Amino acid sequence: MAKGHLVDTSNAGGGGEGATREILVVDDNPADVRLLVEALNRSWVRYHINTVEDGNSALAFLQHRGEYVAAPRPALVLLDLNLPGKDGHEVLAEITANPELQNIPVMIVSTSSNEWDITRAYAAGAAHYFVKPMRWDAYLQLADAITAVGDLRNSSKERTRTSV
């Protein structure tokens, strides 16, 4: 994937009840993106998943700038912390500081289990923190957890940490 490349990964084959939910995945590791998208596509919820590879592209997508002028507004952002350009902490801070974006729940999906990263993410407004799994079955569990807590827009005070 090229830097900042938009990838539409609709799960047309997934089960699905109700309307399709828009998700933005922000991660620079193509293997992690592929595993996460595959796992989410097996969910009973229909997702329309867009991905970008860096923090600057994530903000451009969310603010409808440049090549993302017609990008959909995601119902959920899945954000890695270790990104080129603006890192995930900076992106999260900008999202939560922007009145037009601050109602979009942001879930951190990172390899870091460092307490400082976790504390800092929650202090900046992360809705949830997941440590990236190492096995496929754990990615399926992660997708189930994201689906289960993905409706945090109306309960943003609920903050949880999960390792799968």
Image (spheres, grey):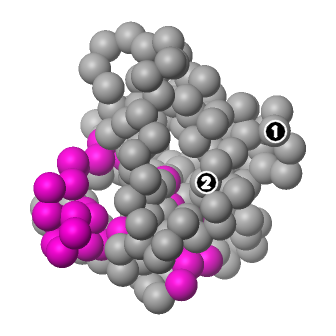
Q: Which element is circle 2 on? A: helix
Residue at image position (57%, 33%) is 40
Residue 5 location, x and y as percent? 42, 66
Q: Is residue 123 above or below residue 49?
A: below
Residue at mark 2: 33
Whether residue 65 is in magenta: the answer is yes
Q: Residue furthest front?
A: 2
Pick out the residue farthest to the bottom. 85
14 or 59, which lies in front? 14
Q: Are marks 1 and 2 in contact (CB under 8 Å)?
A: no
Q: Position of residue 86 (x, y in %)?
A: 44, 85
Residue at 33% from the left image edge and 32% from the top image edge: 21
- The alpha-carbon separation of the residues under discs 1 and 2 comes to 12 Å
Kind of residue at disc 2: Val
SS at mark 1 in the image: helix
The magenta span reads 58-84
Specify whether residue 63 is in view: no
Q: 25 and 91: which one is in front?
A: 25
**How many discs appear?**
2
Label 2 neighbourhood size at 10 Å, few (<14), some (14-19), many (20+)?
A: some
Give the residue drawn at x 64%, y 49%: 34
The picture places residue 137, in percent across and down from the top left corner, at 82, 33
The question of residue 55 being in magenta is answered with: no
Query: In this rendering, is residue 27 above or below 120?
Result: above
Amino acid tagged 1: Trp
Q: Mark on residue 136?
A: 1
Which residue occupies 86% across, 44% down? 135
Hey, which residue is sitting farthest right in the picture? Answer: 135
For this view, does 92 lie left or right of residue 95? Answer: right
Q: Give the answer, above or below, for where 37 lies relative to 30.
A: above
Quadrant in the picture for the C terminus: top right
